[in-house]
Image (cartoon, rainbow, N blue to C red):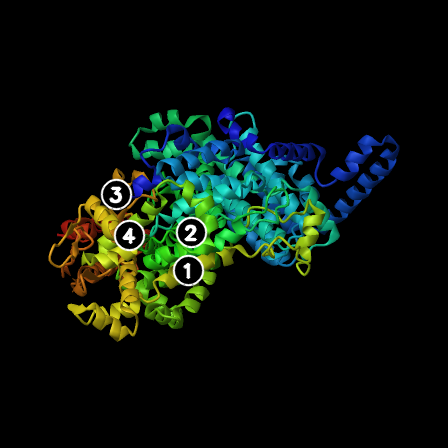
Amino acid sequence: MASAWISPPERPELIEALVSGVDRYNPSNVGILEDYLYHQIRSQEYDCLANLAILKLYQFNPDLYNPDVVINILIKSLSASPLPDFNLCMSLLEERPINATLDEPDPLPTLLPVLRHLHNLLFRCRFPAFWATYKSEQLENLRDNYTVECAGFEDSIRDVAIRAVKAAFTRISPQRLGSYLDLQGAELDAYVQRLGWAADASTSMITIPPNPDNQIEATVVQENIKLPQVTKIISFAATKA
Amino acid sequence: MAQQRMPLWAAEADIEEDIHDVDLSLAIGNYGQGAYDEAQIQPTQITEATLMAVQQHMAQQAAFSQIPDAVKNFIIHFHRAVLDNNLAEITVAYESGWNKFTEKFYAKTEWPEAEVIAPLVNDDPIFLILYRELYYRHVYSRLSPNIDDRFHSYENSCELFNYLLNSDGPVKLELPEQWLWDIIDEFIYQYQSFCAWRSKVKSKTDDELGLLAEGGGVWSSYSVLNVLYSLIQKSKVNEYITAQQAGKSPEEIAEIVGEYGVFPLYRMLGYFSIIGLLRVHVLLGDFTLALKVMENVELNQKSPFTRVTACHVSTYYYVSFCYMMLRRYPDAIRTIVTILNFIMRMRQYHTRSYQYDQINKTGDRMYAMFAMCNALSPSRLDDNIANIAKERYADAYTKMARGGDDALPAFEELFIHACPKFITANPPPYDDPQALAVLLSPSSPSPNTPAPSVQQDSSQRHLALFLADVSASAQVPTLRSFLKLYTSLGTSKLANFLDTDEEEMIQEMMVMKQASRSVSRVVGGEGTHSGTGGSKGLLDGETISTSDLNFVIDGNMVHIAESTIGRRYAGWFIKNTERAQRIFDDLRNMPLPQAKLTASGATPAPTGAHGGDGGRQQQDGRRGGQRVAWGGVKVGA
């Protein structure tokens, strides 16, 4: 699974060359990477390493800084939870001296705490709280100006919840699942059906198919001695005998 | 070759200018540039300039006469060794001579300036560059470098790398591996030190402010990366490693690595530059890129970088730190345990090494890291290391393991202790007096901009991110301790025990599940020396379960299963059998106490040699072990 993260199958060759070579430091390539980011936003793809390369260029060349790009990168990284992508992006955002060259006020300082809060809720699996916050009036700016552009944003967040549910549950009530996905009634039923999960007609409980994480078994791990560990002793015995 | 490097050079035109500047000053002769320039522009001042030169000359002569004869001899000797490429002599001069005379004569002052000792070495420019490398390193480690030292040490590093990279073909210089590592290590250290010093705006004098405003390119991140990448590309070290892993013949490898890579000097500098990049990227907070540059390097005891202990330890430190920041705690723990065991084994042999303190300090930070990672992802990988970590950080260790509110300050304390000294890539706006003034007087915040957090210490930023991660799983230990008592119980009952809301508690359980899964690199386990599967690099890995306690929620019922680990005996028996073998071998090879034979000249020799073997055997387990067994046979036969 990590290999898809290191190099997503959709990543074009040009980007691969940039991400893996020294050309990633060349400020004149920032446009290519930014275009790729907007491509990800339109087409529901995600490439963390390519986006980190943008932030790296911003880190070294403060004059390239584009707050909208940073915000979009952070929005994309939200859906990677519980992987550390959001934090990895944050690590590269240095405090910048006051930027007077921007035409408009920088939206990042006000949105950054909001995004951090959203990430925190996701990472702590507080999905109902996430939706309540995300849909609140205060976050209208984020929704209307940013996430609305990001194709499938809400579904990508639902994927985060689905991953957490899949690992922890064998059966879950529709109310609970609905609160995690921010879906009710027919919408929820359709969503569950698309996942291929079955709902019990009598109890209405939703059954999650078995997977490595929701199968539990008590085991005793026995010691496993490998040959290399004892070669020294055997060779000693052989030569002395 | 030059073409390959072009883009990076071109990335910032300033760099090239800097390097040219440096070249120029070398041609002119150092540190007198200001006067010389003026003389060129204004011919009327020639006499004054000459006068200054004469005065300078006299001052140098006076300084020269102050140098103790022993030091003069040492420098002459050192110079000769470098000229002859006599590695053994260079090593002695470098590792013991220099330190000896430092203790004796220059514990609290600078060594004589390079210009002063120049007559001793026939003004050999290369030796003078190397001498300055040592000179500035001494200033950084023993004294406090002023702004001139910082700028000049940068110039000198540039001269050195210029000489190595931009001469006509590879230079025929040989230096001990330890020194090569120290060159790269010190280069990065001085960069880090400069960045840290630069970010403290308030304590600068007007002179310093002026110099900083002009010297934008000095110690810039681009220039440092440029040097490291250039060394890597020139030496083709990545190609070398790949070819070696593919089992190519020496001839094929020589073909692949080209005219530079065949020389150990370039190859090792290339190797060390990879490690240097790892470090620089960590310092800049780019933990993925740090591991990505390492993708060809295999982390095992056979890698060439392990021949220099300081490099070995430092590599593992930065790799494990990256893993910790990537939330890959099991990988971090495994890396830490490997190197801490190594440090423990070699301790008895390295106490007198001048790097011993440094290695010990790094070791101590790694115990702190171990304590943190172990609290976040408890494992039983190595009880011995766990016990030492517990001993050293007893208080914090228990608090972190218990979780809850007390844990956070403990994590904070250990993180600050364990983390590297992060840097900010960009200087404060020294070239913009207005912005700088704003920065200096935060008491007058402008109305629209929110009060800027003035160049906040970078480590605080990383600490905050780490603590956010940690606090998310603060409740896990408590939940765990309850779950351990049951095989199944209702969610409402559990919420009752915990005195929390049921839905909150269930979401917390998903966090717990999440915390018990991690991406990890091991598949076949390390120690398997088949380098076939390991070529995917340090970032690769698969999701594994890290906890012995597993649970699942079925509607409103929690089912719990616990895995237990059977007691381990093998390690203990293997260790003690091997120890017994060693003692047996030693006994066999000891001369009998009464036998005062004339032939005794023959007997002690093998014993001595054997003792040496035993030492090496301690250092690296398997290979050396065999040597002991064979050695025993040879002596016995």
Nearer to the camera, B551 or A69: A69
The answer to which of marks 1 and 3 sits earlier in the sequence is 1
Nearer to the camera, B405 or B588: B405
Task: Give the percent coordinates (x, y) of residue B604.
Answer: 32, 55
Real-space CA distance between mark 4 and mark 2, rounded to the nearest whole angstrom: 28 Å
Real-space CA distance between mark 1 and mark 4, rounded to the nearest whole angstrom: 29 Å
Nearer to the camera, B625 or A177: A177
Asked which secondary structure carries label 3, the reply is loop
Real-space CA distance between mark 4 and mark 3, rounded to the nearest whole angstrom: 51 Å
Asked which secondary structure carries label 4, the reply is loop
Mark 4 — residue?
A183
Residue A202 position by quadrant: bottom left
Mark 1 — residue?
B468
At a point 75% along the width and 45% down the height, the residue shown is: B60
Mark 3 — residue?
B529
- Of discs 2 and 3, which sits in the foreground? 2
Q: Chain of mark 3?
A: B
Mark 2 — residue?
A87
- Of discs 1 and 3, which sits in the foreground? 1
At a point 16% along the width and 49% down the height, the residue shown is: A239
Instruction: Give the residue type at disc 2.
Output: Asn
Q: Are marks 2 and 1 in contact (CB under 8 Å)?
A: yes
Q: Are marks 1 and 4 in contact (CB under 8 Å)?
A: no
Real-space CA distance between mark 2 and mark 1, rounded to the nearest whole angstrom: 10 Å
Q: Is residue B116 above or below residue B598?
A: above
